[in-house]
Image: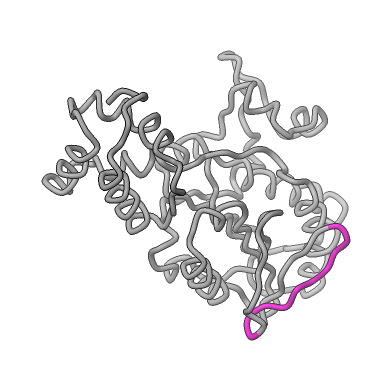
Amino acid sequence: MSTTRVLAPQEFEAFRKFLQEACGILLGDNKQYLVTSRLGKIMAQQNLASLTDLMREMQRNPRSGLKEAVVDAMTTNETLWFRDVHPFNILQTRVLPELAAQNSREPLRIWSAAASTGQEAYSISMVLEEFKKTSPTAFRLGEKIIGTDISTSALATAKSGMYEMLAIGRGLSKERLTQHFTQTGEGKWKVNPGIQKRAEFRQMNLLHSYNMLGKFDVVFCRNVLIYFSAELKKDILRRIHATLKPGGYLFLGASEALSNMPDLYEMVQCRPGIIYRAK
């Protein structure tokens, strides 16, 4: 499929409905070019002439992996290290000291709910490493970060813990690069074992059940809810609340706000930054 091909309105609308049902992403009215550019390679590989043909092929062969490949291609894996800075400062200076003081008899558990290629989960792990150097008796039973994402290709990078220099340069200071990474002979940088061992990555669709994840002290669900409808956002936030321990914290993206859910969350002003405490 040529990236310059114009989609018929009904063709685009049918695909938009499919994508929302498959993974929750709500495409805007002017996203035809995004669809054609991201699916062009798949269309060529499958020798399919139109988006309608692609939809038919996904229905005809549901176990072929084509649907997963299409959703993967349409997923935005935009990420960087310590994105927006404030959340990680809040985690290190406010949330971790509070949780450490509770002397829980369970390991600390943090969920990175849109882990992409792993930068957020590993950023959290670096914060934990640095916090424990100043508070060595904290979290004696250990820490676990669960990173989930719908994109299998993004998760493959996350699991490898290996990054090109271009990715390394996006938000990572030289000090943290030197402290927490090792350069490989391939010109890449590998996350050090102490940082990597805390993080476990799983493929998961946020539309599906969270029951297998267990309970968390902290959830990072940042810069993903902006792609969902208002109704779906509310549903996801309610189900995230069910995964949080009482008093646990939710971190949202800088452009995302939680409103009309006072029965579940309490806003905590951190100046700068806002987090939400589960009631």
Q: Residue at x 16, y 49 (%)?
A: 59
Q: Residue at x 23, y 24 (%)?
A: 45
- Which residue ends up furthest to the bottom in the rendered image? 263
- The image position of residue 128, as x and y in percent, is 74, 52
Tell me if residue 234 comes above or below residue 45 in the rendering. Answer: below
Residue segment shown in magenta: 263-272
Q: Residue at x 17, y 37 (%)?
A: 53
Residue 28 as seen in the image, left or right of residue 89? left
Rendered-image quadrant of the C terminus: bottom right
Residue 76 as seen in the image, left or right of residue 181? left
266 in magenta = yes
204 in magenta = no
- Which residue ends up furthest to the left in the rendered image? 60
Front position in the image: 226 or 159: 226
Residue 257 as seen in the image, left or right of residue 39? right
Rendered-image quadrant of the N terminus: top left
Tell me if residue 143 comes above or below residue 74 in the rendering. Answer: below
Q: Residue at x 73, y 34 (%)?
A: 171
- The image position of residue 254, as x and y in percent, is 71, 54
Colouring method of the image:
one colour
Residue 91 as seen in the image, left or right of residue 264? right
- The image position of residue 136, as x and y in percent, is 82, 56
Q: Is residue 146 visible?
A: no
Q: Quadrant of residue 9?
A: top left
Tell me if residue 21 comes above or below residue 173 in the rendering. Answer: below
- The image position of residue 269, as x and y in percent, is 83, 68
Q: Is residue 103 visible?
A: yes
